[in-house]
Image: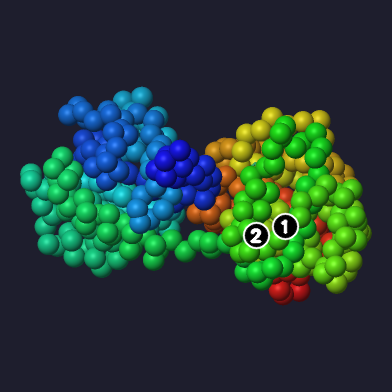
Amino acid sequence: MTGIFTSKIKMQKTPYGLRTHIGILGRRNSGKSTLLNALTHQQISIVSEKAGTTTDPVLKAMELKPFGPVVFYDTAGLDDIGKLGKSRVQKTYSIIEKLDLAIIVAVADQWNDFDDHTVEHLKKYRIPLIVVFNKCDLSVPEPALLQRLKEQDIPAVLTIATTEQGIDDLRRLLANYAKKEINDPDTIIGDLINADDTVILVTPIDNEAPKGRLILPQVQIIRDLLDHDARCLVVKENGLKWALDQLKIPPKIVITDSQAFKQVDQDTPRDILLTSFSILFARFKGDLQAFVDGVLLIENLRPGDEILIVEACTHHPISDDIGTVKIPQWLNQRVGGELCYSHNHGADFPESIEGLKKYKLVIHCGSCNFTRKQLLNRIKKCGEADVPITNYGIVISYLLNIMQRALEPFHFPE
Ligand code: SF4
């Protein structure tokens, strides 16, 4: 197998949630697809002179040097018309919350309020953006427009995508500007451990475990531990006591699936740190403080209140599923009556602030397949609707009265 081939396989296996998501947005016929093809040197998008060739967003996962693993979204024109066109525009807007970075492709002499509105919309979602004035053989931006963008800290590049003029400038800008703007943590657990520490991972293999493999949060944490030269020991919940007995030096931390929290809490000596996969992801993908603040409001819930439970993937629920069965049962017990549960999966999430307001609490899974930006946008939306949001691991540790212990590894204020 050649080196190129192996690295291609590695590249394709980087999970979507760990890639930088870059959207190519703009009006029809501004040259978005041609620009993307020039940028990536790949025929990802169908390019035609006819306006509106791209329909649904086209996704392309690739390695963009020196940036690293990225996903590009080539999108339909934001000014698309007709019934079908409107649904395309809606699809484009629906991917905006996922983006780490947006490239607006525009033709200079067509820039008007419509494009300013697009800029404002992206700023609302706190998405760093770059404006590319394409087709600069036909028109170049007025100095006043460039100045206005500069005053908003929005870099602009001039290109002719068909001849690749300006494409290197755009690549350089992407590498420098985006790295500065995208501040994602680059480790899930590396800052909590030292090289040569031992970490025990507890992963129950029950009905909910997918056949023949571990789930993504478990795989990502094992990889992160190895990247930081730690040793990891993976056991089922009934293997934890045995593992602890075998080790001459105790583990630095035990990380458990939240469903086994109670037993693992009992089996892990109090001087060993303990947390869950889901809580680690609450910090890595979201905002631990917001989730802890959210869980404390469980005490205000009353029977009949509406609760939204959200899973970022679309697996088929099984009989004693954590999101549809276990969390609702534990919460009902705590509240002393039946709450009303709604469930969202994958990209589904209330679109409007008004739609969110009816819920008294949102409980989100670890979001291992989401970008951090995507989850932070949901947290922000909940904040705007004044609806508390928390996470699976936090809510389970809270309901089992072990949240304080589960947060100790993060030196979390009491
Ligand atoms: S439910 Fe959430 S955390 Fe669990 S595997 Fe799916 S996306 Fe990842």
Callouts 1 and 2 close, C-beta under 8 Å: yes
Q: CA distance from mark 1 to mark 2?
A: 7 Å
Give left or right: position of 234 versus 246. left
Crowding around mark 1 (Cα neighbors within 10 Å: few <14, some 14 to 19, many 20+) is some
Q: Is residue 185 visible?
A: yes
Residue found farthest to the front = 1
Point out residue 67 in the picture as x, y percentages from the top left corner: 38, 55
The residue depicted at 50 percent of the width and 54 percent of the height is 373
Report the amino acid beneath label 2.
Answer: Leu
Give left or right: position of 189 versus 44. right
Ligand 1 visible in quadrant = top right
Q: Which residue is mark 1?
A: 232
Point out residue 214 in the picture as x, y percentages from the top left corner: 69, 42
Pointer 2 residue Cβ closer than 8 Å to ligand 1: no
Crowding around mark 2 (Cα neighbors within 10 Å: few <14, some 14 to 19, many 20+) is many
Q: Which residue is mark 2?
A: 225
> Image quadrant for the N terminus?
top left
For the residue pair 202 and 229, the one nearer the viewer reads as 229
